[in-house]
Structures are given as C-alpha cells and as structure tokens.
Image: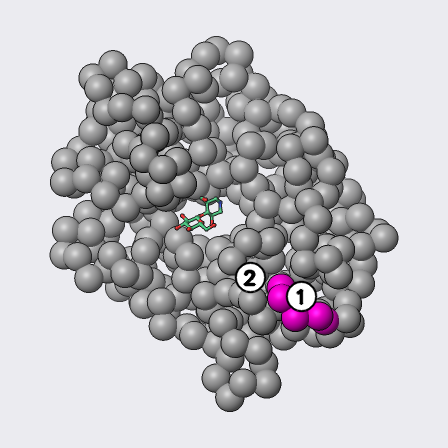
Amino acid sequence: MTLRDAAAKRGLLIGTCISAAALTEPDYVEVAGREFNQAEPENEMKFGVIHPRRDTNPNPYDFSGADAIVEFALQHNMKARGHCFVWHSQVGDWVTSTSHTPDELSKVLDSHIQTVASRYAGKVYAWDVVNEAFEEDGSLRHTVWYDEPGIGLAENGTAYIEQSFRWARQYDPSTALYYNDYSCDTINPKSDAVYEMVKDFKTRNVPIDGVGFQMHLHLDSNNPATLESIKQNLQRFADLDIDVQITEMDVALESPDEDSLAQQAEIYRAIFEICLGIPRVTAIQTWGFTDKHSWIPGFTKGQKGWALLLDEHYAVKPAYTRILETLQAS
Ligand code: 9MR
C-alpha cells in the first residue's frame, strides 16, 4: 500500500512539490510517482523563473521547467497544481528594478496571467493565484503588485488580489483558484484577515475556490491548543463554502534523533487526522518528500532540516508510516 493508494481510497489528493532539476534522479522520479497523486512545481512556475525577460524581448518566457513537471505529473496520472501567479518574491529584476507606472504594471500582470494560465489550461487543475499577500499582523504586505507601485488599485485594499483572481478565471475558466499563505494555519490576526477577505469575495462573487494553508511547522506545534486552533481555523474556512488544501507541509527538526522523529510523526498524524475530519479539505501536500531536497537546511543555514517523510537516502521515516496508518484507518 502506498500513500497515494490509501489517499485515493479516501478521495483525497496527496501531493508534493517537485523540482525539475531533481527529475534527473531515478529514485526521485520513482518515489514521487509511486507515493503521490498530485505534483506542483517548487519554483518553476514562479514569475521570475517562467517569465525571466521583459515582454519586448523576442523570447520573454521559459516554460522548460514547468512543462517538464506538468508532463511528469500527467505521465504518472497525478494532478498538476500551479504555483503561483502573484507573489512578492522571485519576481524577476526586469519587473522590480525598473520603473513601471501602475498602468504598465497592470498590463504586465494581466498578460502574464493570460499567457501562463492559457498554456496550462486543461492540465493544471488548481492555481495559487496570489501567494503570501498578508503580514502576520493582518495588514497587506507592501509589494510591487500592491503598492510599490502596484497595478493601480492600492487604495482599495484587496482590490489588486481580486483583479488577479478575475484575470485567472477569465483566462482559464475551468481551473480552481486558490489564495495561499503561511502562518495562518491557526486562528490569529493573519488568518483573520485572510478569512475576512475570502468572506468578502464570496459575498460579492469574486471567483475564489479555495485557500491553501502552507503548514510549515516545527515541533512546538505539537500541543493540544495549537492543534485545536488549526482544526477550528480550517473548519471556519470550509464553512465559507470553499475548498481547503494543505499546500506546503513540513515539520522542521533541529536534529534527526529518535525522539524528534517520533514527535514529528505525531504532528503529521494529527494534521492528517484533522484534515480527514473536514470534508472540504481536498488535498494535503508536503513541500518535497525526501530530506535530500528541502528548502529548510538552506534557509536556516543548516540549523534545521529533516522535515519531510523520507530521509536523504529515500528511506521512509516514522512520519511516513504514521500517515499511511492514519489514512488506512480513516
Ligand atoms: O522551496 C522554495 C525554494 O527552493 C526557493 O528558494 C524559495 C524562494 O523564495 O521558495 C521556496 O518555496 C516557498 C514557496 O514558493 C512559498 N512558500 C514558502 C516556500 C518556502 O520558502
């Protein structure tokens, strides 16, 4: 029994991000295709990677990595998920370090969403339209798309997010449209702000289909209060009549000792159990699957890591086994 078989029996998608560079490794391809039924490019669809040159360049886009991952997913009968159209990070110097008027920037973003959404229409079943637009205190993050200089809608709060969703719906009417963010897994000022936005969008028929909760966790998440808050938070979003997905889960450790690995497995189990109890949770995705390829060691300068389900030699860890048991028992 594999994770994807057990998840499929529950009608659940179980996903991982995929790095195009790692697709040259036979073990990587074999395990990803065997264990997961959803794949999402880790970096290859981000603005700066897929659209590295200005539109006046004869060749503004580079679809090579994104195409390879979508192809990999479809060949392995996996759903392909898109990430992401609008984000403050990895945008590309030609956007951030040259001066555009809001009107020019609006045309840049409109045309970007049109080009990328159209190319993958019918192949990518869900898109993170906007990623990480809020600060931890619930205010809107200052970004090139919002107000630096923005696409011309900054005085209206979340209007630039709304416009991005409208473009995405226009250019691919059949894909599901998600807002995606981190540190809004529990009930807190940031998740409150996202909640208010989604509620407003639903009331006014702005096309939004779901919210992605990244779920980058640590061992300190292993306490009843935090887990209860995550449960209530996911449920309140589901109650807005949208789908909920876990999009980037990992549980960072400071060392891969036996006790830490057991606690890590317990956190994964608890999150899966919470999700299995909420029918609107349609997918659980981890941000990679082998500790060999994870953003955490680089980001924490080696202080943390070991966050995923398989170790760096592709051997399963206790977290893998606990998830499989949890899916089978559900
Ligand atoms: O895992 C990604 C890493 O390879 C990139 O260097 C990084 C650049 O900012 O982005 C990482 O992925 C991020 C994701 O796109 C959005 N949520 C946070 C993820 C981890 O930083």
Point out the stretch of residues depicted in magenta. 96-100
User: Residue at image x 18%, y 33%?
Assistant: 316
Q: Is disc 1 placed on a helix, strand or loop?
A: helix
Q: Position of residue 248 (x, y in %)?
A: 43, 41
Would residue 180 be visible to someone looking at this image?
yes
Specify the quadrant that holds the C terminus: top left
Residue that badge 2 annotates: 91
User: Residue at image x 17%, y 57%?
Assistant: 25
Q: Is disc 2 placed on a helix, strand or loop?
A: loop
Residue that badge 1 annotates: 167
Q: Position of residue 183 (x, y in %)?
A: 55, 32
Circle 2 packing at 10 Å, graded few (<14), some (14-19), many (20+), is many
Q: Amino acid at mark 2?
A: Val
Specify the quadrant that holds the N terminus: top left
| 238 or 147: nearer the viewer | 147
Would residue 127 be visible to someone looking at this image?
no
Query: Residue at the top extreme?
Result: 224
Tell whether 273 sits left or right of 46.
Answer: left
Q: Is residue 39 magenta?
A: no
User: Residue at image x 65%, y 46%?
Assistant: 133
Magenta span: predominant SS is loop
User: Residue at image x 39%, y 36%?
Assistant: 300
Tell whether 197 sits left or right of 129.
Answer: right
Q: Which image quarter: residue 306?
A: top left
